[in-house]
Amino acid sequence: MQVQIEKVRERVSPEEWTTRVELAACYRLVHHYGMTDLIYNHISARVPGTDHLLINAYGYLYSEITASNLVTIDLNGDEVLAPQTPHGYGVNQAGALIHTAVHQVRHDAMCVIHTHTRAGMAVSAIEEGLLPLTQTAMRFYNAVAYHDYEGPALNPDEKARLQRDLGEHDVMILRNHGLLAVGPSVAEAFNRIYWLEMACKAQVDALSMGRKLNMPTQQAKEVTADVLHPKKRGLLGKRAWPALIRMLDSIDPSYAR
């Protein structure tokens, strides 16, 4: 169904509109923190109480995403509600494949974020993957899934392998490709991709110095992962989210329109 962009808020439930605003904010935050790849990549969120997902139209920069120009799709990737814009943008099929694959089996994953950052791609291309070099990286110690590269995500058969490899993990490194994070809320998914990205950046920096690495003890790695686990610390994203929204509102509140 195509809807005039000015009419989107009138055509969706209050719950969907709230999710649209949060998801648009997430797109702006990913842009703000330099985790974008031109018009590519995607962040998706499940519309509460439905099997519908919100995702970006293929052609917008993340800095252009608003609550009204997000597209609603079903779990097959088919458009349910598409805001009419002068550009006529649709949904990227490779992005829809990755995101619907996760949402189909991870009902706890309200939000899914996939990035192609320079640091994320670099770490995805080395055999060891993410190393427990920093406290930030140790948050994910023994908690990172890996998925081997099969080419651009256009083969529907890859869905089953994506689902298998992710399992119950909250973050996954797509080898030779990029990063993926899921969360029970937009706030938590953003927190996880932010920390994963920072861990990758620190790893690239440390390896680039050509010096002997100081590896933490096994006990330190296990203690850190345990202390920073959501079951111990609670949802870290929820704590930071209000401050991030205040920052966005002070910079450009147009995401919420």
Image (cartoon, rainbow, N blue to C red):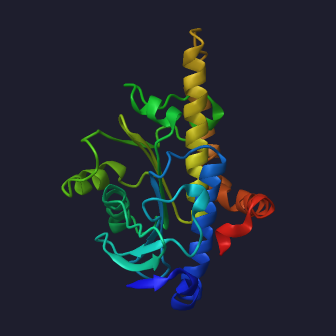
- 125, above or below 198, in the image: above
Q: Residue at x 54, y 88 (%)?
A: 13
Q: Residue at x 54, y 33 (%)?
A: 200
Q: Nearer the viewer, residue 120 or 168?
A: 120
Quadrant housing the C terminus:
bottom right
Q: From this viewpoint, which residue is outermost toward the front? A: 86
Q: Position of residue 185 (x, y in %)?
A: 57, 66
Decide if residue 3 is on the left or right side of residue 235.
Answer: left
Decide if residue 242 is on the left or right side of residue 20.
Answer: right
- Residue 217 seen by the camera: no
Q: From this viewpoint, which residue is outermost toward the bottom? A: 10
Decide if residue 194 is on the left or right side of residue 146.
Answer: right
Q: Position of residue 218 (x, y in %)?
A: 55, 26
- 73, above or below 191, in the image: below
- Residue 249 seen by the camera: yes
- 50, above or below 34, in the image: below
Q: Position of residue 1 (x, y in %)?
A: 37, 85
Decide if residue 22 is on the left or right side of residue 60.
Answer: right
Q: Nearer the viewer, residue 78 or 188?
A: 78
- 72, above or below 242, in the image: below
Q: From this viewpoint, which residue is outermost toward the top? A: 211
Q: Residue at x 54, y 29 (%)?
A: 132
Quarter-wise, where is residue 255 in the image?
bottom right
Q: Position of residue 78 (x, y in %)?
A: 31, 74
Q: Nearer the viewer, residue 65 or 177?
A: 65
